[in-house]
Image (cartoon, helix red, strand yellow):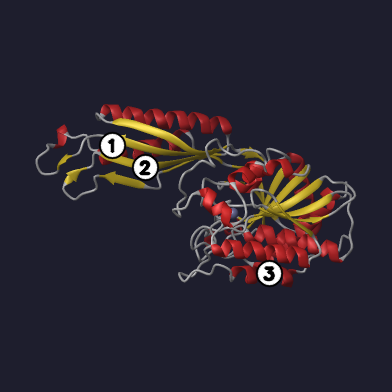
Amino acid sequence: MNDLRVNFERLLKDLEELGTIGRDPKGGVSRPSFSLPDLEARQWLKRKIEEAGLVCRQDGAGNIFGRLPGNQTRVVMSGSHLDTVLNGGLYDGSVGVLAALECLRRLKEENVRLEKTLEVASFTDEEGNLVGDFLGSRAFTGQLLSGQLRTARTQFGHSLEEILQKAGLSTDSVRGAAADRPELAAYLEIHIEQGPALEEEGVPIGLVTSIAGKRYYQATLVGRPGHAGTTPLELRQDAFIALSDFALRATQLVARKYYGNTITIGRVLLKPGSFSIIPGEADFTLDLRSQEPDSLKSMEEEVLALASEVASTRGLTFYSRIADSTEPVRINEELLDRLKGLCRKLGYQYRLLPSGAGHDAQIISAVCPAAMVFIPSIDGLSHVPEEAINPEDLEKAANLLLHSLISLASE
Ligand SMILES: [Zn+2]
């Protein structure tokens, strides 16, 4: 079994085939969850699972699984997601699902029967195009956010209920998905790095040590609109100036006191939004991330306090509402040691690194030990059509996954 390798040509062909589903005229791939291309990709995956002779099932959240039975019902699972952002790349999520599929297919064709059962998984709406990130893995592990399924409208204008109905699902079936979860022994996920670290060092494999937690806030600074020509500067309650002051001071605070954490204001809407009117209101998003739970909590408190302070000093009011949150996760040491040992055995160079982006593995780590293997992203690019990988890196990661699954399922 030591010499067993994945059929890499076949894995590349699968990636290529999947990449034709949801091709965007702008050059990338658009497969937001439950869009027509996503539904097509789901059918495609189910067909691949069945053709491989694996047992296919779908849970109430639309998560898709392919099973290779072992002597025990306990499951070692590996996967990722097939949904993409709008006009995203070919590899985010897809490499994790298809590499796992290839590993199980390879074991099946060698008639390998292991002690534990193996499953490939594809989780619904990892990208959070509908109602917040990780809908599928959150439902699978019983960690749906309160109110997550009650969101009246998705960004596509339809209600979640209407969208789910088209796929034969409902919010009730999503709520019930966790009840179908098998007992999990471990979860592994291959993913592109989505950053530049591995490529810069020329290392093919990244073993993730921790995954950042985040807080998303929807925030507003309310001041007073006024005439741009007649209101003296000192009498203004300009929401944009207050936001600028806050943005700069909060970024300095994080850089100075919480080095390694991040703060991002990704969207700003000024109201009334006119050439000649002082902005009376600034709606903005606030994204805070950290690898450490305590650090995330105290950064969050300080940043929000700073926003209130800036607002009151300038005669404005600050409002905020939490929109989404995940906790930072430290990767299971035993699992990490096993991956390091297998890298050495296979002769693959690796380095340890944290993940700044969130992943299904982070959510699944609440119910079993979970680990992640990163491959380099060319130029660190992700969520864009230019997203690219070196095929040799994926081949190594897929073989590492194959031997990790064999090792974990043999016990
Ligand atoms: Zn992803």
Q: Nearer the viewer, residue 164 or 373?
A: 164
The three-letter amino acid code for the residue at tag 3 is: Asp
Query: Would you identify the image quadrant in which residue 229 lies?
Result: top left
- Image coords of residue 385 (percent x, y): 50, 65
Q: Point out residue 4 in the picture as x, y percentages from the top left corner.
A: 84, 64
Residue indicated by mark 3: 14
Is residue 309 left or right of 83 when viewed as pictured?
left
* Residue labelled 1 has its Cβ within 8 Å of some atom of ligand 1: no
Residue pictured at 35% horizontal, 40% vertical: 247
- Pick the residue in front: 183 or 2: 183
Residue 237, position as x, y percentages in the image: 21, 34
- At mark 1, the secondary structure is helix
In front here: 334 or 36?
A: 36
Q: Earlier in the sequence, mark 3 or mark 2?
A: 3
The spot of residue 49 in percent (x, y) is 75, 63
Q: Nearer the viewer, mark 3 or mark 1?
A: 3
